[in-house]
Amino acid sequence: MRTDRSYENLQAPSPTVAVRCATLPVTRYPVGSENLSPLEHLRLLWSSSPLRESVAVSSPDLATRIEDVLSGRSEPSERRLERLRAGLLRFALRAVTRATPFGTFAGVADTDRSAGPLRLGSGHRRHVRVDPAVAQDLAQGEDVPLVPHPGLVVRGDRLVVPVRWGRRSGRATASSVRTSALVTQVMELCRDGLTRSELVARVVESGVPEAAAGRLVARLVDFEVLVPSAGRSMFEGLRQPGVPDDVVRALEGYATAPWGDGAAELAEAQAALRAAHGAAGTSTGSPHRGAFVHVDTYLDVRGAVPEDLVKAAAAVAPVLARVSPVPAPRPGVVRWAERFRERYGSALVPVLRAADPERGLGLPEKWDEPDPSDEADPERRRLLSVRASLLDRARRTGTGSVTLLDEDLRSLPHNGGWPSSYDLFVGLSQRDGRTVLTVTPVGARSPGGRGIGRFTLGNADLAERARTWAGYDRAVHAEAVVAELDCGTDDGALNVVGMTVALHAATLALTGSAGSREDDRRIRLDELFLGTVDEGSLGLFLGDGTPVELRQLTMLNTDQYAEIVRLLLEVGQSGGVAPRWSWGPVGGLVDYVPEVVYRGVVLSEQAWRWTGGRGSRDAVSGWLREAGLPRYVTVGDGDNRLHLDTEDPVHVDLLAGELGERPAWVHEAPPPERLGTIPGPDGDHAAELVVTLPTPDEHRARARRWSPRPVVREADDEARRLDIGKGWTYLTLKARRDRFDGLVRTLAAAAGARPWYFVRYDEQGHGQLRLRVNADLAALGDLFDVVARLRADGTVGEVAVRTFELELERYGGAVSFGIWQDAFCVESQALVAGAALRVRSSDDEPDYAFAAGLVEAWLSVAAPDPETADRVLELVDEGYAAELGPDVHVLRATARQHEARASDAAAALGEALREHWTAPSAVDAVRDATVVQSALHLFCNRLGLDRREEFVVLRIADRARRKERARAGSRAG
């Protein structure tokens, strides 16, 4: 298909800046007031009208308990009273020190970069809306139109909702109903939307009893086969389906109340909404934290961010990408992608098929558990060396700050692979009379616009900014369909931050939370395919090979989504990374790390590690003195850090409560007077910037191009599945890798004359030998006797006989795969007969010359002609060069030091394969460059080469072929 070309004349937007700012000035920094009783302190803090409103928005339950205590309606114990005081003090501290938008505590604004210094006014605006859980319940009322779920999938005789967001299901999971003539009729009737009562009446007209019709409609709604048509409007404004007029008036009254003095109007709106929700009688769950009303704050900000700060920020994000291991995709997804490539090769596989535990791979496991082999990765080791050198430099200078120099970065790669743009999150503070940028724990996020996406629903300026960056994203991916994710969850809090205005013309319809638009192309989950891309990672595609880029421009933590949605986001956001400074393994070995500064920007604050233990006031006070911590610190995860004064005993109690029994880092923080950087009517305010920038060319991910791909189809399933006990037998044996060669020889002898082949594999850091033998399970008694002895003497560990899905598409279909499988048997047996299993010298270094001779012999026969062989090696060079990054230059230099060596083993291998490929039975094999390259990779696997070694060997073989061609040309001349 052709895609949007409106941005074909590619022009990167200029950087844009959004300001995030606390609404209360730091001059109101709350002291602990140890001289006051907890009740007196509670009353003092609660006397602030803006704080009362903010707490009532964000935690109505806490606000109610405080009101009950202060009014005398409740007389709590001293311990409970102390907990109330601590909870309110935490809110009071965050209200003046934390700039992350949250209710009315802090807000956001676009900036005009052409008009004077930044200054905060008093005309802030509330964007008020109903809690999504409550809105969904109200939208299921009798007078709200129902429509078919936009992501419905037909599977056999069932209508399937692959991802649901109803709270009855706990976490979002699939649901389905059996298709019948009546269900089909209901779906047709609802195509343009009918209310529940209208739908029941229409079904009754067809002869169905009213009670049965009501039960059917209720069941379809309960299973989310039918959903309210409200969609995105539930998040956009107050006049939503099912919300009574009196509730709307109360909400409007609160939205327009004087800033900082709306607690009474808020209480009225919450009461009206609570009553309407109770009267609806359709409640499937509670609003998040009891907050029936949600608020975003749009700040009254005038002025511009100084150009020098924007330039300083622009220099930082590329550095972050180089000094931190990029955490996307996650290790579990990388392992899953390897299994995908092994099974499907270059084929396109329906997402639902690949994620199916029976018919496909299931979903990734242990998403964040790293592979043991990662620590040996050269890039990680270089990064470890840079971190260690910074610690050593700080130790030698005796200061709490160390500067990261450009020369420190020279050994590190550029880490290309980002999307079109990114957001950098930086806090502002004052130091030595100048404004200093400090990268927040959020770091950088991509693509650009994520930091403002959630706020586009109520702010036209921010919406326009987000559309600019979304348009640029489409321009960079002009050959792809860029689709936004339509996915609500069963957690109302996530829906609050998981929805934006419509930014792209295509939508992946999962839960129907975005509603529908006339110009919107809706992609169902069963129309989406997974496939490999050049650099070995996975991508999303349509069935015709058109790449799909998936976007959700919010800061939502996707761990809360159903796992299939997490997989889609990991795969569908090419280069979707979140680089930030990390001390990595070094941080686990020390109890102190210095501040790290790059070109005047603080990448990471000075920090001390609490090693755990009983977190009492005395214990924490003693640790603070012994470790030499400064007066002001922050503690906590991510952007939810708590700013504390260690000279205030009540603050120390809060710190002790935050630390607890487990190790945790405590960071240096600016004093309150240095934290205020934007002046307002009542004092200076804590602030941070979200700077959105286009990605430099050297970091940007290569756009995925359209290419024809074989497609995994249900019709081939009978030929695809290798069941236990029928035909071929598939055996896996866990063993040390250095035992593989001996194992193969032993098992080959036991298999006798039966055709067999093997694959070396790494299963989550452990060696696994995979053997396939062309015989029924019942006929392999002698083989299993040998395996039993190997198991008993400890040569092998876990042994399993497994089902297997043949890589039909990877090798050109069922007939072609059978021919290639016979070739695998021929080459496996030839390697054993020619003592060519181990292509390593006595010191375990690869014998590159010997291996290249084997590869040259293999390729000269397996490729149908020299042109195909050339293209195979081009594919290897292109793909591996992208995957291996800067190390490819070292590997090419290694290849130039070796020459391919002919051998008897290579000659015997070539002769055996020539007999196979020239036989009439091989004529129907698909032997194009892509298929031959897949088979060549498998052959290198049998030689025991890893991907880096394989690249070197293939470069040597390629040079040998070119030299031979040149000699042949000279002789002909």
Image: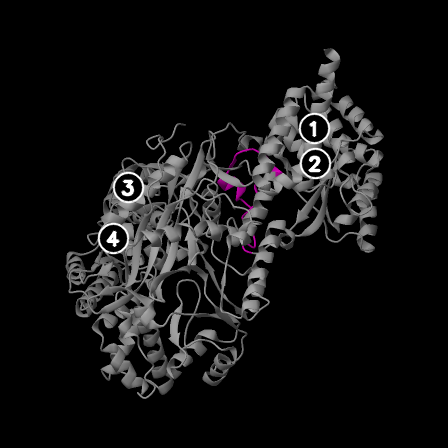
Disc 4 crowd, CA 10 A, few/some/many (<14, 14-19, 20+): many
From the viewer's side, name the closer residue of 437 and 872: 437
Disc 2 crowd, CA 10 A, few/some/many (<14, 14-19, 20+): many
* Real-space CA distance between mark 3 and mark 4, rounded to the nearest whole angstrom: 18 Å
* Real-space CA distance between mark 1 and mark 4, rounded to the nearest whole angstrom: 73 Å
Residue 952 picture location, percent across and down: 69, 37
Magenta stretch holds residue 266 = no
Residue 260 seen in the current view: yes
Q: Nearer the viewer, mark 3 or mark 1?
A: 1
Find numbered disc 1 in the image and state the secondary structure of the residue it sits on: helix
Q: Which residues are magenta?
A: 342-368
Relative horizontal placement of residue 946, taking residue 122 as reference (left or right): right
Quadrant for residue 292, please give it: bottom left
Instruction: Tell me the kind of residue under disc 1.
Output: Arg
**Which residue is denoted by mark 4 in the rendering?**
141
**Which residue is denoted by mark 3 in the rendering?**
203
Magenta stretch holds residue 347 = yes
**Which residue is denoted by mark 2 in the rendering?**
895
Q: Which label was assigned to residue 959?
A: 1
Query: Is residue 402 depicted above or below 463 in this figure?
Result: below
Find numbered disc 4 in the image and state the secondary structure of the residue it sits on: loop
Quadrant for residue 186, please give it: top left
Considering only order in the chain, which callout, 4 or 1, is on the residue closer to the N terminus?
4
Disc 1 crowd, CA 10 A, few/some/many (<14, 14-19, 20+): some
Q: In the rendered structure, are the residues bearing label 1 and label 2 in contact, judged by CB atoms less than 8 Å apart?
A: yes
Q: Principal SS element in the magenta part?
A: loop
* Real-space CA distance between mark 2 and mark 3, rounded to the nearest whole angstrom: 74 Å
Instruction: Tell me the kind of residue under disc 2.
Output: Ala
Instruction: Tell me the kind of residue under disc 3.
Output: Val
